[in-house]
Amino acid sequence: MAALRAAAPPCMAPSAPDHDPDGRELSVGDLRLCSARRTLIGPHGHADLDATLYALAERLMRTPGALVEDKALIAAMHRGATRIPDGAAPVLRKQVQLLRGVILVLTRERVQVPTEQGVGCMMKARR
């Protein structure tokens, strides 16, 4: 068992800290984001994320409990793009819904992503 733990990436190790100083892992409540594997890990399982969902989760988890404007979330989704495509707002809403569904399954509502329509959203641990 010790060999298995030693072989696991830092964010999968059971003793991993809540926040990795190298920036490889972020957490909000019971939810952890492993950047080495682009995986969300919760008490009820884990989910590998595509690039878009990973970018959204990472941006929201950098500032837990703080409202992140839609513009910042769209920019995170299109990181590296020279121009943000028209119609990005509806795509953002759909991606946030998908991320919410993943988080619901992994945490059973212990972590939430409330939205302030037309402004932005946040990720926060439920008390």
Image (tube, rainbow, N blue to C red):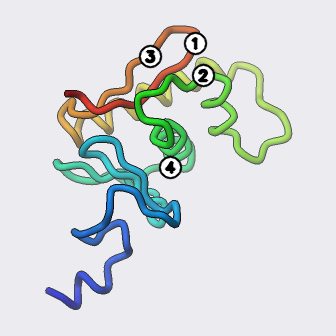
Circle on res. 69: 2
Q: Residue at the left extreme?
A: 1
| Crowd tier of the residue under label 2, counting other residues whose Cα lies within 10 Å: few below 14, some 14–19, many 20 or above | some
| Crowd tier of the residue under label 4, counting other residues whose Cα lies within 10 Å: few below 14, some 14–19, many 20 or above | few
Q: Are marks 3 and 4 in contact (CB under 8 Å)?
A: no
Query: Disc 1 or disc 4, which is closer to the eye?
Result: 1
Q: Amino acid at mark 2?
A: Glu
Query: Disc 4 or disc 2, which is closer to the eye?
Result: 2
* Residue identified by numbered label 1: 119
* Mark pair 1, 2: CA separation: 6 Å
Identify which residue is drawn at 70% across, 19% down.
87
* Residue identified by numbered label 4: 50
Q: Are marks 4 and 2 in contact (CB under 8 Å)?
A: no
Judged left or right of residue 87, residue 98 is left
Identify which residue is drawn at 37% across, 72% down.
10
Mark nearer the N terminus (3 vs 4): 4
Pinpoint residue 74: horizontal percent, then vertical percent: 65, 30
**Compared with residue 62, is residue 69 higher up or lower down, i.e. above or below?**
above
Label 1: state its secondary structure. loop
Judged left or right of residue 9, residue 67 is right
* Mark pair 2, 3: CA separation: 10 Å
Q: Residue at the right extreme?
A: 82
| Crowd tier of the residue under label 3, counting other residues whose Cα lies within 10 Å: few below 14, some 14–19, many 20 or above | some
Q: Are marks 1 and 2 in contact (CB under 8 Å)?
A: yes
Pinpoint residue 39: horizontal percent, then vertical percent: 39, 56
Q: Amino acid at mark 4?
A: Asp
Identify which residue is drawn at 23% across, 38% down.
105
* Mark pair 4, 2: CA separation: 21 Å
Mark nearer the N terminus (2 vs 3): 2
Mark nearer the N terminus (4 vs 2): 4
Q: Amino acid at mark 1?
A: Val
